[in-house]
Image (cartoon, rainbow, N blue to C red):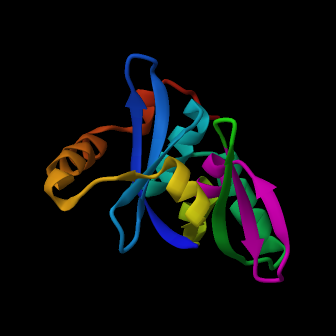
């Protein structure tokens, strides 16, 4: 397992498809995962520390976990089959629950839970960006600093 950081969310053009970009901690691989606009908004809200007037689904799930005394210990991006990523929520009790990576990432950001990717997923879908290409990643980060959840065109209630 390799620890991953969330770089951010962006919209891929011309398809207008949101992508969450993860970066291998201590490595040079990036993992792009195509996600839905609702999950993109949820991830962007969590990264920006925004709290909506009413809780989003991921906020509600976090509150329910706290209410029942369950701790999320890690999120794992476990597989990539036929272009579809798979993830697991791993609880301190040892229970593992299958989840979409976008939901798992949104929850991990809200709970401060580490995110990991398997070697297989990173080998299959990871993109190595050597240090000399790091300025392109920096441009992407600058783009992320300027984008807001409203740019994804969803109306969360």
Q: Position of residue 153 (x, y in %)?
A: 49, 24
Q: Is residue 156 left or right of 44 when viewed as pictured?
A: right
State whether residue 109 is above or below residue 136: below
Residue at 52 percent across and 71 percent down: it is 2
Which quadrant of the view contains residue 30? bottom left
Quadrant in which the C terminus appears: top right
97 is within the stretch colored magenta: yes
Whether residue 146 is visible, yes or no, is yes
Q: Is residue 60 left or right of 24 when viewed as pictured?
A: right
Q: Position of residue 61 (x, y in %)?
A: 74, 58
State whether residue 155 is above or below residue 73: above
Q: Position of residue 43 (x, y in %)?
A: 51, 49
Q: Residue furthest top?
A: 14
Residue at 52 percent across and 40 percent down: it is 40
Quadrant in which the N terminus appears: bottom right
Report the span colored magenta. 85-105
Residue at 37 percent across and 21 percent down: it is 13
57 is within the stretch colored magenta: no
Which quadrant of the view contains residue 114? bottom right
Whether residue 114 is visible, yes or no, is no
């Amino acid at each position: 397992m390799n620890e991953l950081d969330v770089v951010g969310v962006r919209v891929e053009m011309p398809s207008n498809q949101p992508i969450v970009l993860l970066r291998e901690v201590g490595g040079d691989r990036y993992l792009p995962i195509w996600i839905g606009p609702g999950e993109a908004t949820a991830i962007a809200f969590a990264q920006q520390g925004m709290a909506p007037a009413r809780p989003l689904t991921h906020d509600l799930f976090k509150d329910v976990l706290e209410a029942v005394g369950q701790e999320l210990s890690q999120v794992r991006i476990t597989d990539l089959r036929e272009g579809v990523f798979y993830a697991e929520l791993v609880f301190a009790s040892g229970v593992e629950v299958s989840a979409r990576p976008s939901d798992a990432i949104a929850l991990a950001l809200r709970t401060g839970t580490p995110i990991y990717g398997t070697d297989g997923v990173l080998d299959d879908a990871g993109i190595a960006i050597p240090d000399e290409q790091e300025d392109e990643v920096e441009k992407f980060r600058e783009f992320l600093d300027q984008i807001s959840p409203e740019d994804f065109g969803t109306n969360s209630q």
